[in-house]
Image (cartoon, grey):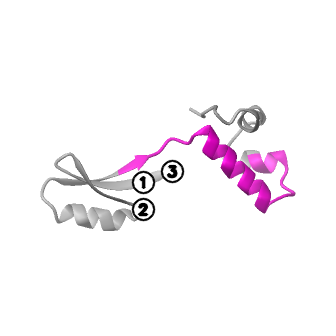
Amino acid sequence: MEVHAVFVGGELLDVGDHLPFLQALADGVYDAQAVTMIKPDTGERRLYQIKRYLDVCPNATAQDVEREFGLTVSELVTALLDPSSGRD
């Protein structure tokens, strides 16, 4: 999950999801920098996403879920059985 932010002099100024706006903001301020931060995917969030996908697509097969989330069968089983396991 990507989050964009503007830092001025090392201090966080603003956060958002529209990078071009934040870049324009950073360009107009001395010592400012727009950056993209990637929030790591947690097992709990992945489990929620899988369950939501299955609610929307109740006839999805294990292969469909594998393709959608880039998981192998063993990773899928682990995610469903142990939501605290994070994917590195």
Q: Point out which mark residue 1 bears.
A: 3
**Which of pointers 2 and 1 lies earlier in the amino acid sequence?**
1
Q: Are marks 3 and 1 in contact (CB under 8 Å)?
A: yes
Position of residue 53 measured from the top left corner of the image (x, y, whole percent): 73, 56
- State the extent of the magenta-drawn residues as a range: 36-65
At x 19%, y 55%, the residue is 32
Q: Point out which mark residue 28 bears.
A: none
At x 58%, y 40%, the residue is 42
Our reading of the magenta stretch's main secondary structure is helix
- Above or below, 44 against 57 in this view is above
At x 39%, y 47%, the residue is 37
Q: Point out which mark residue 17 bears.
A: 2
Position of residue 75 measured from the top left corner of the image (x, y, whole percent): 72, 34
Residue type (three-letter) at the residue carrying disc 1: Val
Image quadrant where residue 70 sits: top right
Q: Does the magenta stretch include residue 63?
A: yes
Q: Name the residue under label 1.
A: 3
- Label 3 to label 1: alpha-carbon separation: 7 Å
Q: Under tag 3, what secondary structure?
A: loop
**Which of pointers 2 and 3 lies earlier in the amino acid sequence?**
3
Q: Under tag 2, what secondary structure?
A: loop
At x 72%, y 49%, the residue is 50
Q: Residues within 10 Å of mark 3 (few under 14, many from 20)?
A: few
- Number of numbered markers: 3
